[in-house]
């Protein structure tokens, strides 16, 4: 049986999380509504000038690579 969309999203976020935590930040899943994901950056990541780059080049890129049907990454 194939893993659910939510399970795959959570696995990708779990893989990314240690890199964010090394810099004093973290990412929280706010809502998973297939095919989209709402997240919140916290800690040092919140308000960081590189946060947009981190979200869209790092997080979104990895989600899209791993989950081809992934839609939008929405920062809240």
Image (cartoon, grey):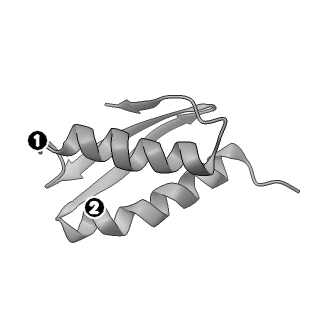
**Judging from the image, what secondary structure is the residue with disc 2 in?**
helix
Residue at 63% of width from left, 32% of height from top?
34
Q: Residue furthest right?
A: 1
Q: Is residue 60 above or below residue 75?
A: below
Q: Are marks 2 and 1 in contact (CB under 8 Å)?
A: no
Q: Secondary structure at mark 1?
A: loop
Q: Which residue is depicted at the point 38% across and 40% down?
A: 39
Whether residue 13 sits left or right of residue 4 in the image: it is left
Q: Position of residue 36 (x, y in %)?
A: 54, 31
Earlier in the chain: of badge 2 and badge 1, it is 2
**Rendered location of residue 49, percent (x, y):** 10, 41
Q: Rounded to the nearest whole Å, what is the CA distance between mark 2 and mark 1? A: 14 Å
Front in this rendered view, residue 31 or 51 = 51
Q: Quadrant of residue 51?
A: top left
Residue 75 position in % (x across, y down): 33, 32
Write the residue at 48% across / 51% down.
62
Q: Quadrant of the C terminus?
A: top left
Quarter of the rendering containing residue 55: top left
Q: Which residue is mark 2?
A: 20
Place residue 52 in its image quadrant. top left
Reading the image, the residue beneath label 1 is 49
Whether residue 71 sits left or right of residue 54 in the image: it is right
Q: Residue at x 55, y 42 (%)?
A: 64
Q: Residues within 10 Å of mark 1 (few under 14, many from 20)?
A: few
Mark number displayed over residue 64: none
Please indicate whether residue 22 sits to the left or right of residue 61 in the image.
left
Comparing 19 with 53, the one in front is 53
Q: Vertically, is 76 above or below 41? A: above
């Amino acid at each position: 049986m194939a893993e659910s969309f939510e399970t795959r999203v959570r696995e990708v976020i779990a893989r990314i999380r240690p890199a964010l935590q090394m810099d004093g930040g973290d990412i929280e899943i706010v809502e998973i509504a297939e095919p989209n994901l709402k997240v919140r950056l916290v800690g040092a990541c919140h308000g960081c000038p590189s946060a947009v780059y981190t979200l869209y080049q790092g997080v979104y890129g990895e989600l899209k690579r791993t989950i081809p049907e992934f839609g939008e990454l929405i920062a809240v």
